[in-house]
Structure formats: structure tokens, C-alpha cells
Image (tube, rainbow, N blue to C red):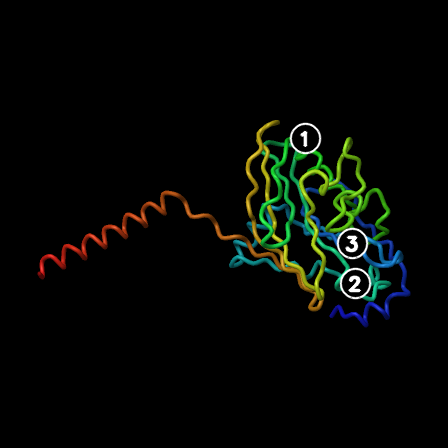
Amino acid sequence: MMKTNKLLVLAALGLAGLSTATAGTTDLLLGFNDAAGPNAAQNDYVINLGLTGSGLVAAANANSGTYDLSSLLLAGTFSTAFGADSSALNNVSVGVVGSLTGSSPSYLFQTVVTGGGAPAPAFVGEFNKAAASASASTVGEYSSSSTTGWSYNVAASPTSPGGASLTTAGDVADQTGNPLDQLSSGVASLDLWQLTKTGTSSLGSWVDDGTFNINLNSDTITFTAAPAPEPAGASLLAAGAGLLVIAFRNQLKRKHV
């Protein structure tokens, strides 16, 4: 279990240098970073969730609506990355981003603090730059100053963008909004939103895919898919059925008057 005293014990371990995967994945990436802590804790820890955004939603729906990702979280790696910060469970930030491009439609996925509403509307150029940066971070644990890192390509903190140039790739926070939230007593809740681009120029509206719940006290990460919207036809049928029931009851009342 991830406790503050555990962080203190592991503070002297230093960086593990666990960069284990190259950039360019289409899977969702979950990233932690700590811009609020001491220099020794200003590191990135990035996890490949092993599924695209659409794949995660499908997996959750196939599992009674919730999908458990806890096995992907390495508590020891988290401790090594942020152990120099005695307040890591309140200082470390977390978010999820991902993209699926190269075909039509293309998709961009990113989180927002639960209850914060959809990210801001985006232009096609912003979509393209954010989608490129969303898949660019190296997976593993390493210094946040790396130009292949989460802090550079996504965001440095919930209130600060990353370091990627606006005229080149462009970090996610600068293009379509900041996907990070700061842990509070080791816990964070984030809504995952999806933006679709059809062809080269047509953007849809942001769609709420569901919610991540992250708890570093119990080393758990779960995703709960948003309820599927009710088809318009079903709503009309339900309304029509209700009117028929009311009409039938009124007819019975008149017969018994």
C-alpha cells in the first residue's frame, strides 16, 4: 500500500531509469508527474494502459461497466519516482491522454477533472497537434526534463502546459486543454472525453466516455464507462407508451362514473 512513510523510506533510491517503450503508441497513456515537489521528485511516471480509448470503453461495457487497471500500477516505481517528496500524495498530478490517427475517423482522448465538463472546442490544427503529443511520451519513469517525457508532451502540472512548441507538435494542454488533476490524499477522479475527426477537416463534439478513479492508498485504478445514451426512438416509444397508459386509465374511469 502506498503510504507517506513508504515514500520517505524509498526517497534515497534515486531514479530507476525504467524507460521501457518508445513513443508513438495508439494506447491510452496514464501519466503522473510532480512539479510541486522538490527537484529530486520532479519526475514522470507513465503507464501504457494497453487499450485504445474505444477499446477501454468496450472492455468496461463487457465487464458490467467497470474495468480494473490496477495491475498496471507499480507502487514501487511510483515510490522511486516521487519518494523525495514527503507530500507526494497531495502534490503529484495525474491524467490520461491517447489518440488513434492515420485513418478516418481519427480520435483524441483526454481527461478532465470529474464534473469539470467537456474540454474546450478545438480546431483541426489543435486536434492534430494534441493527437501527436498524446502518443509521444516514453513509457516508464524518468526525469520530467526529458523532451520525450510526459511533462514535455502533455502538461507540467494542472495549471501549467508542457514544453512542446506551439508551432511544432504542441503539448496537449496548450492545444485542447489541460488533462491533469492533482492527487488529494492519494485520490483523483477524472472523466475521459473523446473527440472525433472525420476526413481532414470535420470535427465532432466532445463525448463523455466514462470516469477513472485512481487511489494510491490502495494502489487501484479503475475505469467506469458512461451509460450509453438512450436512442431518440426509444425515448419516443417510452413517452408514447406512457400516454397510452394514461388514456386507458381515463377511459376506465369514465366507464365507472
Q: Which residue is under mark 3?
A: 33
> Looking at the picture, how far across and down is residue 1, in whole percent?
73, 70
Q: Of residues 66 and 184, which is closer to you in this image?
A: 184
From mark 2 to mark 1, how far is it between C-alphas? Answer: 36 Å
List the residue tagged with mark 2. Answer: 88
The residue closer to the viewer here, 117 or 212, is 117
Secondary element type, mark 2: helix
Quadrant housing residue 166: top right
Q: CA distance from mark 3 to mark 1?
A: 27 Å
Looking at the image, residue 218 lies above or below residue 210: below
- Taking the image as shown, residue 152 lies to the left or right of residue 98, namely right
Mark sitting earlier along the chain (2/1) = 2
Asked if residue 57 is positioned above or below residue 221 in the image, the reply reads: above
Amino acid marked by disc 3: Asn
Which mark is drawn over residue 157? none
Rendered view: 223 above or below 119: below
Residue 26 at what x, y percent from top left?
Answer: 68, 42
Residue at left offset 64%, top offset 53%: 113
Tag 1 residue: 125
* 10 Å crowding of disc 3: few (<14), some (14-19), many (20+): many
Q: For numbered disc 3, what is the local secondary structure?
A: strand
Residue 8 in percent (x, y) is at 85, 69
For label 1, the crowd category at 10 Å Cα-Cα, with few meaning under 14, some 14 to 19 and many 20 or more, is few
In the rendered image, the residue lying farthest to the bottom is 5
**Mark 2 neighbour class, 10 Å CA radius: few under 14, some 14 to 19, many 20 or more:** many
Residue at figure coordinates x 62%, y 56% from the top left:
212
Classify the position of the C terminus by image quarter.
Answer: bottom left
Residue at the extreme front: 159
